[in-house]
Amino acid sequence: MSRIPEDELEFRFFRAGGPGGQNVNKVSTAVQMRFDVKNSPSLTEPVKARLMKLAGSRLTLDGVIVISAVRFRTQERNRADAVERLKAMVAEASIKPVYRVPTRPTRASKERRLKAKSSRSSIKSGRGKPSLD
């Protein structure tokens, strides 16, 4: 996996919503992490392309991935959570997709298919009402 230096990550802290009492109203524990994929020197071009596709709605028009972490009650844990989520995305983007090489069916498989179709057809044609002839 490609290693992303800390100086390429930008962190902003803000107050999280939801339950938590006074702690939520006083302390900025939620984290918004920004990573500029488009201008990152630590990733190769194919990995950048796959990562930008994988990011989906988390990617801005400028090519920046924005990850918000609000699951935990401390800044440190939310920051670590955001970094882990980015690492998982980069790890997934680092895997080169395996392309299927198209193959053609063999003559024997075509014959088996046609034989099965004709036998099924004869079974079904025998189910009809008896003819008056």
Image (cartoon, helix red, strand yellow):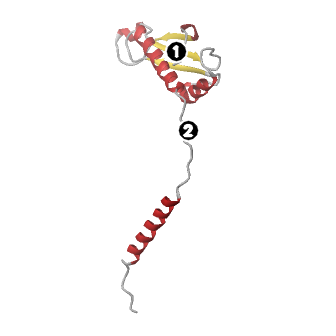
Asked which secondary structure carries label 1, the reply is strand
Measure the alpha-carbon separation of dots 1 and 2: 33 Å
Whether 52 is drawn above or below 130: the answer is: above
The three-letter amino acid code for the residue at tag 1 is Met
Q: Residue 92 got which mark?
A: none
Dot placed on the residue nearer the N-terminal end, 1 or 2: 1
Q: Is residue 103 above or below residue 11?
A: below
Q: Nearer the viewer, mark 1 or mark 2?
A: 2
Q: Is residue 104 above or below residue 30?
A: below
Query: Which residue is tagged 2?
Result: 99
Tally the numbered discs. 2
Please indicate whether residue 104 sits to the left or right of residue 31 in the image: right
Q: Nearer the viewer, residue 53 or 12?
A: 53
- Percent coordinates x, y for residue 89 in the rendering: 50, 23
Which quadrant, please, contains the C terminus? bottom left
Say which of 128 and 104 sits in front.
104
Q: Report crowding for label 1: few under 14, some 14 to 19, many 20 or more residues within 10 A (C-alpha).
A: many
- Residue 43's x, y, as percent? 60, 18
Q: Which residue, given by chain and number where applicable, does mark 1 sit on?
A: 33
Tell me the amino acid under the disc marked 2. Tyr
Q: Nearer the viewer, residue 47 or 107?
A: 107
What residue sits 63% from the left and 14% below the top? 41
| Quadrant in which residue 99 is drawn | top right
Q: Residues within 10 Å of mark 2 (few under 14, many from 20)?
A: few
Residue depicted at x 57% and y 16%: 35
